[in-house]
Image (cartoon, grey):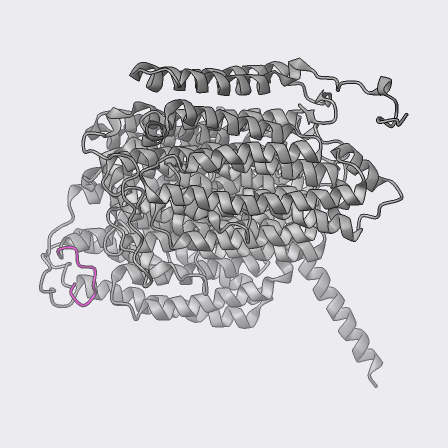
Amino acid sequence: MTIHLSIVLFLPLAAGLLGAVLPRGLARWSVLAGSAGVLAYTVAMLIDFESGGGLQWVTDDEWISELGIRYQLGVDGLNLFMVVLTAVSWVPCTLVAAFTQQDRPKLFFFNLALGETAVLGAFMAQDLALFIVFFDLMLVPFYFMIGGWGSGDRVRATTKFVIYTLAGSLLMLAAAIALGVLATPSGGEISFSLADLEQRSVSEGTQQWIVLLFALAFFVKAPLFPLHGWVPETYRSSPIVTIALLSAVLSKVGVYGFLQIVMPIMPEGSQHWQELFIVLAVFSILYGSILAFSQDNVRLVVAYSSIAQLGFIVLGIFALDDKGAQGAVLQMVNHGIVVVALFLIIGVVAARAHGSESLAELGGTAFRAPVLATLFLIVALATLAMPGSANFMGEILILFGAFENKLVYGLVASVGVVLAAVYMIRVFQRLMHNRAGPAVESREIDGLNLAAIAPLVAVIIALGFYPHFIPDRTEEATIASIAPAKQVAETIAASDARERAARAEAAP
Amino acid sequence: MIDLLPFGADKVAAPVIDYKELSPLMATVGGSIVVLLVGLLRGRFVQTVAVPFLTAVSLLTAMGLVVWIWEPGDLEPIIEGALEADTLALGMSMLFFVGGLVCIALSLRADAPRQAGHGEYYSMLLGSITGMVVLAESSNLITLFVGLELLSIPLYVLCATELRRRTSLEAGLKYLVIGSVGSATLLYGLALIYGATGTMSFAGIAAALGGDELSSTDPLLLTGLALSTTGLAFKASVAPFHQWTPDVYQGAPTPITTFMAVATKAAAFAILLRLLDGALGLSQLEWGPALAALAAATIIIGNVGAIAQRSLKRLLAWSSVAQAGYLLAGVVVGSRLGLQATAFYLAVYLVMNVAAFAVVVARERGSEHGDDLASLENLGRLSPWLAGAMTIAMLSLAGFPATGGFIGKFYLIDASVSGDYAWLGILIVIGSVISLAYYLRVVATMWMGRVELEMPTVPGRRVKPVSGWSPEADLRAQPEVAAIALVFAALTILFGLWPDPLFEAARDMGTSITGLH
């Protein structure tokens, strides 16, 4: 079977454009059909995917030859599950929005569709410039969705969000152009194709500042401490489906960029900043976890827990260890699915409390809603990485990786696992148990939300039973991605050891 | 007998004139005269239909002639030693003509031509365009100055054509005074360059620099260079010579502002490229760093200045200052890539600014807020197409992908990094980040309801509606303005997705200055 990635990429946008010309009421169904189509196509991709087969279903065309930008798409072990995660997340969110979003539906659903295309493009792009095009493009629909359909001080929130993210990604743009220009051998044609850039090399000093600018963009997006200033306002003001997607999928684009772009192309530069990035990651784990259990707004609990989770992922990547990196890839998928489910559940609960999302006002939702409580319990346990869940496997792999190379940081990070249990159980109790809040009506989950959330929970359970499904397909690509940087680190460690041995010999 | 002519009379010959290459210029000059004369006739039809129509015909003819004589690599002079129609000049001429056509369409229902007289208004517009073409085609210092004056003087008048509005007169006067200072500075600089090199022609200057007698650090030359760059910087609104820009842009009739923003900018950069990269290319090491400092200052000052603006015309004026800074980066590097990037960005800049200004014109006539930001409030619901056009223009100016602005900035950064000015590339990016603060505010005003501005300083100056506003004068009443907004917004997107035709033109233009690396 031939898979055409361009179809996956532009299907949502086509559906969005179609929705824009259809009568008002039909836009939502067009976009929903588009995202369902993408999901079906990605399932076909999963079946057709050849483990360890390198880059597959490559599309490679000239786009802007003058600038060396190619329209190059491809899927390998690194981004296969990112594409799947995008498809899996978008369908339930579109479904929920289709039944609840009434204000200016054409525009909203067009943005939703454009967002899916942009995210898929960023994941599938095999050309650095194309990646940046999509990376920046995905801000536009999210800017409009948060600013146009959010609540509270939404304009301020969305402006802050865009300025933060675009500041990072425009600097990355400058760094990427510099990388492309400086890597061009004299007399050669400029190229941004990832494969070409891997062959060409730039000096170590150049790599260092370029990696730093890339990291800035990716860390803002993730978000990681201390670049998370946009998080509280954005999470508070966004429509629930938007924030679910933002937290689940967009946050992964950045960390994915490390594996697909930064590590293979600039191994020396990545190794140079390893220590700093790990410190930031560990700090994010602790900072996020601690803030997560001091928040009153449920969304912010999830927001800060995401910061902690992304910290784990970055730790896994920069441990420069095979196990750690595999854990990171696994955790990227796990976290994405769990977060979508969490936010949709928050939406359901808030609907039972006249829109309140304050822990102080909620409670007792479980009394007449056993199904909702069960779904939430499964999701909550997965989030806190209960043994038996795929998240457990992901975090354990990450920690093993960290123990291998950076023992101290690994030990500190493992505190985060404990803290996760604290804040997730707190949220579960405050929402579901305790005395019912003043404005809370306990009501069973409705059919719509059940249809959206239950499949996600099913995926979580399935992954819990068979977590190897993911590493089996991603292993080879992940190991290959970190191999150059790992080799640099090993060389340095070996020469350090030799030096130490020599010094020990020299000493009397 | 005293020999009056040093080489003997028989050796003096009239310069060779290539009338084919001269034809676009003849079209605009002829058009200008015809329009002026036809404007003398009485009658509503003649005034409001025939005159603009003839103006447009003249410009369209000139555009057709440009296409006819377009030949990359052809450096044949039009008038020996004075004018040269290479592809750079012709490509820039196209921009002036497009700017002129847009100005005609936006002026159709404006007050300015009615108050100043249709014939005079359109004739001066063509006169100014003629000046721009002469400037872009000039190949020696004298024609440079003649072109600059020919472009400026009609513009001074055009700025003041809304005779019954004080701010319009103020704008005209301010532009006249400051423009004259700029011209004087330029003239002084040109004289010094002539003094240093002993020649008026650009080719001669380049040859003198290439020779042994003149060092590229010659103080006379450098002073001349600095003064003439300053003079041109006034026209291009490069900081710190930009102060007139917000006032004049705001005061001038909006169609004229549009024309000034896109065409004058292109003309100023055309001659900057020709003078610096062409004639003085060999001393790039001397003027490069200084010009880079100017570019850096322009980017920061322009973007910071725009943040606090409530008037859309002032906002776009400051934004045009910032964009001049980006454009200057392409001149600074003094390379073929830089020239192409500047030419490319000028075209994109025209497209996105025209879209923005057309929406401003439409709202000035369609709301009681004039050009205040409030005139855009809730435009997303009232008139989504106009709001869409404005949104695309703003996102493109800010450099979002899938718009021409993104590709243009990409090209400029590419040129900066290749020319060893990586820091300037990063500064372009930082400028874009600052610019988000105001571009996004415009977008938010249109789509996200009322935006409260947090500005502790003076409340924004309210400007009275520039054109006679009436509640009936809504979008349907001015289809040409809406059409321009939509067409140019669509072009902005088109150039973001498929920029190849523009790249090809830019590559052709790159061939016109020899000796670039």
Instruction: Give the left or right position of residue A350, taking residue B239 as reference.
Output: left
Q: In this view, does A351 lie to the left or right of A64?
A: left
Q: Can residue B307 be seen in this view?
A: yes
In the rendered structure, does residue A361 fall within the stretch colored magenta? yes
* x, y percent for residue A439: 9, 61
Residue B271 picture quarter: top right
Magenta residues (range): A354-362
x 57%, y 35%: residue: B149
Q: Residue B103: horizontal and vertical position, in percent?
A: 42, 28
Relative to B246, is A62 above or below? Answer: above
Main SS of the magenta part reads loop
Which residue is depicted at the point 66% across and 23% down? Answer: B85
Determine the residue positioned at 39% across, 29% down: A11
Outermost residue on the bottom side: it is A508
Residue B172, quarter of picture = top left
Q: Where is residue B269 in the image (x, y as percent from the top left)?
A: 59, 38
Taking the image as shown, residue B151 lies to the left or right of residue B12, namely left
**Residue lying furthest front:** B1
Question: In the displayed structure, does residue B444 sit left or right of residue A284?
Answer: left
| Magenta stretch encompasses residue A307 | no
